[in-house]
Amino acid sequence: MSQTNTTQNSIISFFGYLGRWFLRAIESMGDAAVLSAISLAHLFHRPWQGKHIVLQLYALGVGSFIIIAITGAFTGMVLSLQGYYTLAKFGSESLLGSGVALAIIRELGPVLGAFMMVGRAGSSITAEIGIMRVTEQLDALQMMAINPKARVILPRIIAMIIALPILVTMFDIIGLAAGYVVGVELLGVNGGAFIGEMIAKITPMDLYAGWVKALGFGVLIGVICTYMGYRATPTTEGVAKATTQAVVAGSVGVLVLDYILTSFFL
Amino acid sequence: MIRTEKLSRHFDGVVALDNTDIHIKEHQTTVIMGGSGSGKTTLLRLLAGLECPTSGHVWYGNDDLNGMNQKRLYQLRARMGMVFQYSALLNSLSVYDNVAFPLAEHTQLDKSVIHTMVTMKLEQVGLRGFENLMPSQLSGGMAKRVAFARALAMDPEVVFFDEPTSGLDPISAGVIASLIGDLTKRTKMTSIVVTHDVHAGLDIADHVILLWQGKVIAEGTSDVIRHSEDERVRQFIEGRPDGPIPFSRSETSYIEDLLHKPGTVRMS
């Protein structure tokens, strides 16, 4: 009897914990949406934040180019290797170009590019805003009659939204070039067939799908990472926790959103 | 000029400030003193509008800070300055850019005019020549002086100081304290200083407010506070460990707890 009660209590406690976690997650999502909406509304109000958006675009976009280029190159190379290994079994090596291109443009470019941006730029956004909270820099801005939502959050979200599609396009180009080098120069696939198949099989809708995904991921990462930093508990541990949560929530969010967007574009 | 009406602030059930009514007079230095956790920084943040009260009001003339819209609040803040306890300099900007920041944001002044004004403010705090340093290269005292220069950049009517002398060497603390006193008199600004540095506080104050457990327990001129017969005030300004203000936050002592614990064997 007592053992049954203990088991029942454990189950109730587990579902209670799950329910509370779910409610907290919903509450945070609502809070993040409201904070971002209020911040983005400042895009249409004076003072214009153009200069700060450009500065953030440089920090987030240009600063992330190298890591995006390296990831893109190795993704294209490994796809070419794996694709060749699989296609050679069916004697269809000529399809390598279209296989690599479709995988990179529709899926791997946006998703891996977004992962890299969460890890490299998103975490730095959260940590930077969190530290501004800890060191009272956000309060100092308030006291200087400068709205931190307009000055700190808005430029970072907008920069992320602009930077990610551009970086994903670069990821795609570098990935395809690297795939070409491995497929054609190292593995001996016919260059004409590689390019020809690629051009024949890639439709404008594939390119469009990749860019829409990149745009969606940009919004998602910008919103999550700025929110986590802005609402970080103002302690060293709080900022560390917020940064970890931003990377985890951003990465999982990218995968969930990827599934939703892919289902629309199939 | 600034007054509070039944101002209270609670944090998760803990009372930081309780039904406080104070009056800050124009062109004077008002020093808010009290021990750690007495509610003085909370009061300062409420006066600056950085916190929302649980109940009560903060009045700026006839304007209530509570119901104020953001545009009006920012208009008001353009006439305020604040020196934070840990300086709160913008890490990405140099000393020069930190001091120039409010001028560049809120005025249409020519760069050469801003340069002259920044140089003058840095000269006032003894840091002319350090314009190109970054906040990470400054000592705590220097950072506080830069924060002071930044707070003065717009020639504000009201300046809030949160522990302006804490963590400073005696010379820097003395310079900052005398600067607050001098500038308040010369520029007719209103200074509100939160500190637990009794000597510096009483030296520069025109009006002193003493807080304990979120309530005002004494107020008046420095002389009134110095000669107060209230035991709590005497204990605070004399820095005595024994008195009505307990050092320990625990209700009972650990030894008493142990002695009354069931099973404790007393050795006689």
Image (cartoon, rainbow, N blue to C red):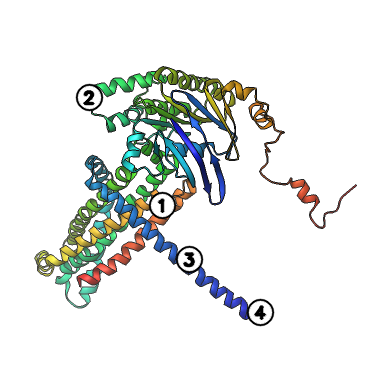
Task: Give the CA distance from mark 4 to mark 3.
Answer: 26 Å
Chain to which the residue tagged by mark 1 belongs: A
Task: Give the CA distance from mark 3 to mark 2.
Answer: 56 Å
**Disc 1, SS:** helix
Which residue was labeled with disc 1?
A243
Chain to which the residue tagged by mark 3 belongs: A
**Disc 4, SS:** helix
Q: Is residue B213 left or right of residue A255?
A: right
Corner quadrant of residue B264? bottom right
Q: Is residue B141 left or right of residue B121?
A: right
Look at the image and tell me whether residue A205 can be seen.
yes
- Marks 2, 4 in one chain: no
Within 10 Å of the Cα at label 3, are there few (<14), some (14-19), or many (20+) other Cα atoms?
few
Q: Earlier in the sequence, mark 4 or mark 3?
A: 4
Amino acid type shown at disc 1 = Thr
- Marks 3, 2 in one chain: no
Task: Give the CA distance from mark 1 to mark 3.
Answer: 22 Å
**Disc 3, SS:** helix
State the residue in front, A216 or A255: A216
Which residue was labeled with disc 4?
A2
Which mark is in front, 2 or 4? 2
Q: Is residue B235 left or right of residue A148?
A: right
Q: Earlier in the sequence, mark 1 or mark 4?
A: 4
The reply to whether callout 2 and callout 4 are in contact (CB within 8 Å) is: no
